[in-house]
Amino acid sequence: TITIVETSCGYIIGGYSNTPWKSTGKYRAATKTFLFVLSGPDISSPCKMKKKNANDATAVFDNSGYGPTFGEKGMGCDFLTNGSFIHVRFGRSYESDPSGRRISLAIKEMEVFRVTETSSSTSATIASPKNQRIQTQIGLPRPVTRFSEDINKAINAKQQSLLTAESEILHLEDSFKDECNFVTTFASGDAKDVVTLNVSGTTMVTKRSTLQVVKDSVLAHQFDDTKWKQGCDTPRVKEWSPDEVNVWIHKIPGIPNDVVDIFKENEITGYELLALKREGLAMIGITRPGTVCVLVDEIKKLEKESLDFVTLIEHSPYCFGRILDHLRLKQLHSQGLAEEPASPTVCESQMSRFEKVVKYYFPGDIAKSILG
């Protein structure tokens, strides 16, 4: 499974485990676990933290009272989800990230995906295009026959062991590239592709491309990029450039010119602007009480406006959530990261409503791909 958490302050962090989560209340070993930080306010580039000890029997912790947990709890877990918070203590059982952070953060959204292999048979693996490419790249040497039988045998055996080692190295290089591509799939993407939905009072966040994964559906047309941009030419506050922030602060009545200059000199972006509190304003040199109060009040208004930039979906959150989970799995399947998803599992009391919502968004035969 791969766990991805977006925090309320803008970090995207997570972990990968090659063993399924259970509720045994015990630690378990996992041979290929790692943690990662993809982005955040002070993150210049994604980083990955492996286990310090590959044979560590406390790689993951299974407990029904917590969410995904990595590392030994007695030492202070490296990664622990508990309720609406995630507690990060990198550097215990896993490697430390460059900042050596030890923080507790509010969770904005968390998702756990099941990762499946595309093939389980050895024969299929040997015959895969990747292995054929590696074999072609290495080539097959001609056996040595010019010396005595014993010397020929020794040279050919040594030559074969070198070829085997080279093949293993190429496999590791390809595995590393696949792993990078896998993580990059979740880390990359245009921020403008992220859509916030208000589903009858429940906030849901996803990508516009996910909502468009089923062609010719109502959702695909509703969130079509070309139609979406009409009437929405003003970018959200988080996407403001320093110049746009300067335009905003110029419009606030009573703000001294020296304060405007401070914002300009520090090249404050929209994302940074929303994070500024009294302490942050003091750090950049704005300390006059009246000015601080005005700026804090104006920033709060911007934050509210940014949160209000959502699309209303007037359907059952339960039913729409099941549809959204299914679309996310279909999106992963289209990228070769998951199997073709089965029809969503829906409780009996909601089945009739679920079918109506599906038929509304996926008219005609399209609904059969979800309802089965």
Image (cartoon, helix red, strand yellow):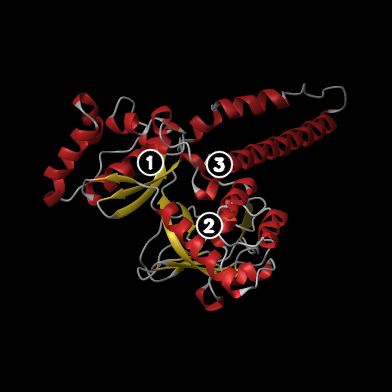
> Gap between marks 3 and 1, in whole Å?
16 Å
| Callout 1 amino acid | Arg
The residue pinned by badge 1 equals 328
Instruction: Please say whether residue 268 is visible from this viewpoint.
Output: yes
Judge by depth and name the residue closer to the eye, 184 or 333: 184
Circle 2 is placed at which residue position? 10
Mark 2: secondary structure: loop
Q: Secondary structure at mark 1?
A: helix
Residue in view at x 55 percent, y 46 percent: 239
Q: Nearer the viewer, residue 218 or 182?
A: 218
Whole-percent x, y for residue 229 in the image: 43, 33
Q: Which mark is residue 68?
A: none
**N-terminal-most mark, 2 or 1:** 2
Quadrant in which residue 54 is drawn: bottom right
Percent x, y of residue 240: 57, 47
Q: CA distance from mark 2 to mark 1?
A: 21 Å
Disc 2 or disc 3, which is closer to the eye? 2
| Secondary structure of the residue carrying numbered label 3 | loop
First in sequence: mark 3 vs mark 1 = 3
Nearest-to-viewer mark from 2 and 1: 2
Looking at the picture, does residue 322 appear above or below residue 174? below
Q: Which mark is residue 188?
A: 3
Of the two numbered discs 3 and 1 in the rendering, the one whose residue sits closer to the viewer: 3
Q: Position of residue 173 (x, y in %)?
A: 67, 39
